[in-house]
Each structure stands twice: as structure tokens, then as C-alpha cells.
Amino acid sequence: MKVKIKHIEWRDGRPRFKPGPGLREKGHKPQDLKHPNGRWFTQGEALDWSNEFVRALTAAKAENVPAAFPAVPVMARKKTPAVYPVSKLMDEWLKSPRVLCKAPATIKDYKQKTRVIENHDPDLWAAEVLALDQTICYGLYEDLWTSRGLATARGALVVLGMAIKWGMRSGRLKGLSINPARDLDMQQPDPRARFLTKEEFDCLVATAEGEKFRRIDIADMLFCGVWTSQRQYDRLHLKQSAFRNGRFVLRQNKTSAIVNPPVATPYQARLDAALERRNSKGVISPYAHLNENTWAPWNDYTYRNLFSDIRAEAAKKIPTIKTVMEKDLRATGVTWMALAGNTLPQICAVSGHSLQGAHMILKHYLALHPEMATTAIGNLVTWYEGGGSSDLAI
């Protein structure tokens, strides 16, 4: 709403000098109030102009001369910088409690995906967040898909969407009502569908314990991976205090899910043998698994390198092993439990997966697995021949 200013009327929000009959008789004519560069007067400038004109009229009346139009100086407009660029949003989001409470590996992953955006599109990185829309974000997604692959593109846009969502909720993006990085209908990359056969697993164990490596401690970690179905970080940091009354209790580092399954007999035998070796050396440590070359807790770097070396050697005997990744040990545990006839809830009680997560692992390579099909038909025959009822219980 515009205030009333003497001698000025407003047309579509723009000021115009409107002289009354007396002023028109003295030669004044209506005119737009603009600066020489074509910019319209602001409301404040129009008020200043009116006040100056009234003073000029008063002075001219006293001197009995025509009043001159006042001069209103043109105020130079500064170039408006980006108020809240993408770079600042991402930096503040990464430093927020929302992110800092995550596991170190998760934070590292977020930072890597953030750098993908920064390196791929410096202009977007410096642009104001409020200038983003779904068209721009989808264009970034397709550019990254073409140049870096679908998984990288999807990951980068997911992280951008998370940061914008945080910015909206924290009040940093008050002018944004819709998250432009959400609902982009992005493609899902093909999931990794890999689990070890019993032959592959036995070959890895034998190679680790064999003449070339003599790393029983790595073989123990292989058993831990398959027979607990836990993530690498949780396995490397597993404490002896987690084992109680034939079970182990663990709060997973990534999701905080708590699992408390029994210790499988093959894995328990490994733990007992490791404890004997440790006691014979007089080593005292709270960790369940140690690097027995140093008798210190495992670090990620050493463990990953040893696993890679052992995998390469084992692949000389069974070539398919070269495609095995360390994280496949967990998927192997989940898959073997399914092949043993366990239900999804039973599997999740051991691995800590959500039902959806376990289903995603299994659905890509169990549907046509002959052992699963055999079990299914066997169960069906048993139910049918046992007089199973198909009536609904109401």
C-alpha cells in the first residue's frame, strides 16, 4: 500500500507528478517521476521530491517567480550479492548437529558428494539457493549421470536435497516452499547382488591361513563377517564385553539398531582359539579381534589392504573371487540365512537390517535360486498332504 504524497499520484505502483488546477495555470504539467537513467523513484525518493517541490513553491511565491522542479540525486545501485549461496548452505549443513551426529564414514560420504557438485558446476555452487528450481536440479542430475555415472548423480542430488530440507526447516530458506532437489524421478542404480558361495568362502579362509599369509586373524574376521552379518566398522570395533551367555549384544554404529543374537558355533570356535593365542602372549585388550602382528586393534586401512591381497591370491584358485568385496560378507550372511529357510524378521533380528533393506538384498538373486525353490515346494507339499486349510479365519 502506497502512502499519500502531496502532488503525487500512483499508477501501478509508479509515482507521477499531478499538479492541481492552480499549478497547471502556472505552466506545470503532469509527468512521470523517473531518474535520468530510467529508474522510477522509490516511495522514499518520491516523498523527498514532494517535500523539496513544496519548499520551492513556498520560496517562489515569496519572490513572485515560477517554482522550479527540485533535483533528486540518482542513488547508485549496488550489485546485490547472493544472499545465501549453495556453497554456504552446504558448509553450514555439514557443520550442523544434524550431520555431526552421524558416523564418520557417513560424514565423509556426504562431503565427497558435496565436492562432486562443487567441482562439476562452480556456477551453481556460487548461485543463490532460492534461485534453484526443479528444472535446474534435474539438469544437474542428468549432467552428472552422463559424466560421472548414475550412482554418483543420484547420490549428489540426494545430499543436495537433504541440505535444502535442513535449510528450510532451520529458517535459512524462508522464501522456499518446495524443495527443488526432491521428487526428481531419479533412476535407481542396479543394486549390487553378490554373495559368496561356500567354496569361495572356504578358499578365502584357506588362503588367509595358508603358507603365504599365515593370517589366522584375517580368517577370524571372515568368519565374523558371515556369521554375524554385521558391517565392517562394527566388526572391527567389536568388544569382548559384547559377548554374554552365548550371545552378543551390539548397538550398530550407523543406525543405532540393537541386535542380540546367539553366537554361531563356527564363529565361537574362532573366538575361543583367538583368546587362547592372546592369553599365551599375555595380551590384554577389550577388543574381540586384534591385528595379531601388532596385537593392537584393527585399523580400516591395514585390514582393507590385507583383505585385498588375500582376495587377489585366492582368485588364482577360484577366479570369481576377484569380484568379491569385503562388504559382501554381510550380504553373504543374510543370503545364507535365507537359504537355510529363515524368514525376513528372523534374518533382521541377526543382521539389524530393516525389513525393506533385507528384502532389497534378497530379491535380486534368490527368486530363481534352486535351493529356495526346492524348499518352497517342499513346504507346500507338506502343508497340502498334512490337511492344511485354505479357509480364512474370521
Image (tube, grey):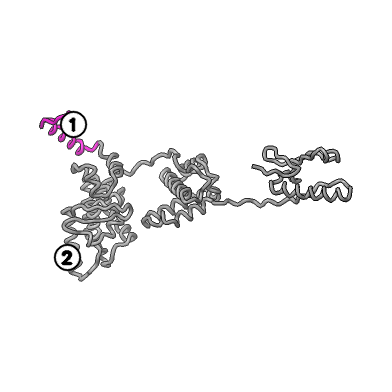
Kindly report which numbered mark, 2 or 1, lies closer to the viewer in this rendering. 1
| Front-lying residue, 362 or 345 | 345
Name which residue lies at 31% across and 50% down: 325
Q: Secondary structure at mark 2?
A: helix
- Secondary structure category for the residue under label 1: loop
Q: Which mark is residue 11?
A: none
How far apart, in angstroms, are the residues tagged by discs 2 and 1? 56 Å
* Residue 275: percent from left, percent from top: 18, 64
Identify the amino acid type marked 1.
Ala
Mark 1: few, some, or many residues within 10 Å (few <14, many ≥20)? few
Q: Which of the two residues, 52 or 157, is positioned nearer the viewer here?
A: 52
Q: Amino acid at mark 2?
A: Glu
- Circle 1 sits on which residue? 393
In magenta stretch: residue 380:
yes
Q: Residue at x 51, y 54 (%)?
A: 88
Q: Is residue 367 depicted above or below 97 in this figure?
A: above
Numbered circle sitting on residue 276: 2
Residue 122 horizontal/vertical position (percent): 54, 50
